[in-house]
């Protein structure tokens, strides 16, 4: 709620002191951040659109961290920079140093979820790979590893299948035919909490069912597939070179003469558009024709949102799509992201079209958000990706729903709402993992029809509209679409 208070003040400035000491991670070549994160809450009375602010950000050398309906979070390094706008920023937050985020040499104990020290810190790629291999060695009957392909720089992409053997299910009287549940970690490499949460969920799925936040009982009903690091090149780059690497992209070469690298993995798939240079806000397109909203010059390869030359050009995106086609009976998909505390349904590519399954998707989302809040009191908003963020083509959630046929497909932006942004302290890894595990538990119960009360509850129209923050126009569109 911190930033909502800031937005109400709009012109107030808050400053947090930097820690006095800095531990250099010299053996990784990683330099601690020295920049600041500024939020610009722009009033519409100034006559500026979201695209105007983003363009000014690009030309100023700032790095866009998050785009919201009425604000943009911009990271500046050095910290004395700011945007040339006719209104002040709403707040300034010097980022925490990395010394308390990256202790090395911490051992892991996979025999217990609660007592393991692994989830107390963030981990570089080689430690994550070791964790995944140890999962397979420790639980060989439950965890199988699949190499789903290679990244642009040649790194292996590994998926964990976590499921009970059919013979064990038959012995316990449970059906052998189960549904599939897919979870992916951070596509955007600096979103470390998303990768750490994916690892926590994998551990929860093999933990003893008597432990708090264990999910192993759901292996009777689901086969889980977890891709903890869908962008291994980008993730490694944030450890070896730049923790807050500005791009949302992978690290592939996009042309022999291009000075910039990378394709935005969340612009490279379903409804791909070559000219989607900047995201379009829902409020900016309500009175425009969507077919012309992306007109203009081809996207700049140096843009954070560069979509590439063609759909699925990013090998990582293509690998995931190919892997998904091999999996049977998929019913749920969760794309873990940060930050913003939002649980979003399709679509991202349009704010005008509503999925035919929107009512069920939204009902499950409302319950999942409530499940998150029950653990540590963390509030999550719900709604479509387009309404909660901005209109953008190529999103993985749209692909999973519209092409892969996964009815319950969601994007989940984890903590926080801007206090730390992508630099969420390591002390929050376990709390975020716990509340996300409770969300997965609810979604599994909802999708399988095994929720505690034995029957689904269907909120009335007024409840849905209030809790999901839909506008009257959006809810009218939803109701009209779902009318028999």
Image (cartoon, rainbow, N blue to C red):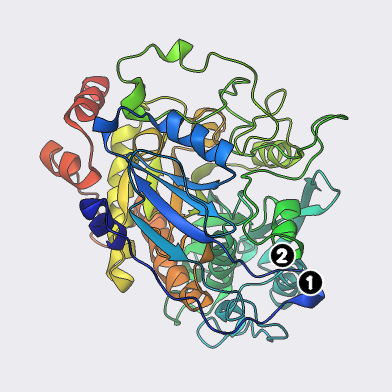
Q: Which mark is residue 381?
A: none
| Spot occupied by residue 335 in the image (x, y as percentages of width and height) | 52, 49
Q: Residue 410: which quarter of the image?
A: top left
Q: Nearer the viewer, residue 332 or 121?
A: 121
Q: In front here: 432 or 132?
A: 432
Q: How far across and down, in percent of the image, does residue 214 sit?
A: 47, 74
Q: Secondary structure at mark 2?
A: helix
Mark 2 and mark 1 in contact (Cβ < 8 Å)? yes
Image x and y of residue 201, in percent:
53, 66
Relative horizontal placement of residue 424, taking residue 385 as reference (left or right): right
**Which comes sooner in the sequence, label 1 or label 2?**
1
Task: Indicate the position of residue 445 as horizontal and vertical percent values.
Answer: 37, 57
Closer to the camera in the image, 437 or 77: 77
Q: Is residue 357 above or below residue 153?
A: above
The C terminus lies in quadrant: top left
Residue at the (79%, 69%) spot, across then down: 29
Q: What residue lies at 55% left-to-right and 46% top-to-bottom?
A: 62
Q: Is residue 173 above or below residue 345?
A: below
Q: Which residue does the numbered mark 2 point to in the structure image?
A: 239
Residue 261 in the figure: left or right of residue 75 = right
Image quarter hosting the N terminus: bottom left
Mark 2 nearby-residue class (10 Å; few <14, some 14–19, many ≥20): many
Mark sitting on residue 28:
1
């Amino acid at each position: 709620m911190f930033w909502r208070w800031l937005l109400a003040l709009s012109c107030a400035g808050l400053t947090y002191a930097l820690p006095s000491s800095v531990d250099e991670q010299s053996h990784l070549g990683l330099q601690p951040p020295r920049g600041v994160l500024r939020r610009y809450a722009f009033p519409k009375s100034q006559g500026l659109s979201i695209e105007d602010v983003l363009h000014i950000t690009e030309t100023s050398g700032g790095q866009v961290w998050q785009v919201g309906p009425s604000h943009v979070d911009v990271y500046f390094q050095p910290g004395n920079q700011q945007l040339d706008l006719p209104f002040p920023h709403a707040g300034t937050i010097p980022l925490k140093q990395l010394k308390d985020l990256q202790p090395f040499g911490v051992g892991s104990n996979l025999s217990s979820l609660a007592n393991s020290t692994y989830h107390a810190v963030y981990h570089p790629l080689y430690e994550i790979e070791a964790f995944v291999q140890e999962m397979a060695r420790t639980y060989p009957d439950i965890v199988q590893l699949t190499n789903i392909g290679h990244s642009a720089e040649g790194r292996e992409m590994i998926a964990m299948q976590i499921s009970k053997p059919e013979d064990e299910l038959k012995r316990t009287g449970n059906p052998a035919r189960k549904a599939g549940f897919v979870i992916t970690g951070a596509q955007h490499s600096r979103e470390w909490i998303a990768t750490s949460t994916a690892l926590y969920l994998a551990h929860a799925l093999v933990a003893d069912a008597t432990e708090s936040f264990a999910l192993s009982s759901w292996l009777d009903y689901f086969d889980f597939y977890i891709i903890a690091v869908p962008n291994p090149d980008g993730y490694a780059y944030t450890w070896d070179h730049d923790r807050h690497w500005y791009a949302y992209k992978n690290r592939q070469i996009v042309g022999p003469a291009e000075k910039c690298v990378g394709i935005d993995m969340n612009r490279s798939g379903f409804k791909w558009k070559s000219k989607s240079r900047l995201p379009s806000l829902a409020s900016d397109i309500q009175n425009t024709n969507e077919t012309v909203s992306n007109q203009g010059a081809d996207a700049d390869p140096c843009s954070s949102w560069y979509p590439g030359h063609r759909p699925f050009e990013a090998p990582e995106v293509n690998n995931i799509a190919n892997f998904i086609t091999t999996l049977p009976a998929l019913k749920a998909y969760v794309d873990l992201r940060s930050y913003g505390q939002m649980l979003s349904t399709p679509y991202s590519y349009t704010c005008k079209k509503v999925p035919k399954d929107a009512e069920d998707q939204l009902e499950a989302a409302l319950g999942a958000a409530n499940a998150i809040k029950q653990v540590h009191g963390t509030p999550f908003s719900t709604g479509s990706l387009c309404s909660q963020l901005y209109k953008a083509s190529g999103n993985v959630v749209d692909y999973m729903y519209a092409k892969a046929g996964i009815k319950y497909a969601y994007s989940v932006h984890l903590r926080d709402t801007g206090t730390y942004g992508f630099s969420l302290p390591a002390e929050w890894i376990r709390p975020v993992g716990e509340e996300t595990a409770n969300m997965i538990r609810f979604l599994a119960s909802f999708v399988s029809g095994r929720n505690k009360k034995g029957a689904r509850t269907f909120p009335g129209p007024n409840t849905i509209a209030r809790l999901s923050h839909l506008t009257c126009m959006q809810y009218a569109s939803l109701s009209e679409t779902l009318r028999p």
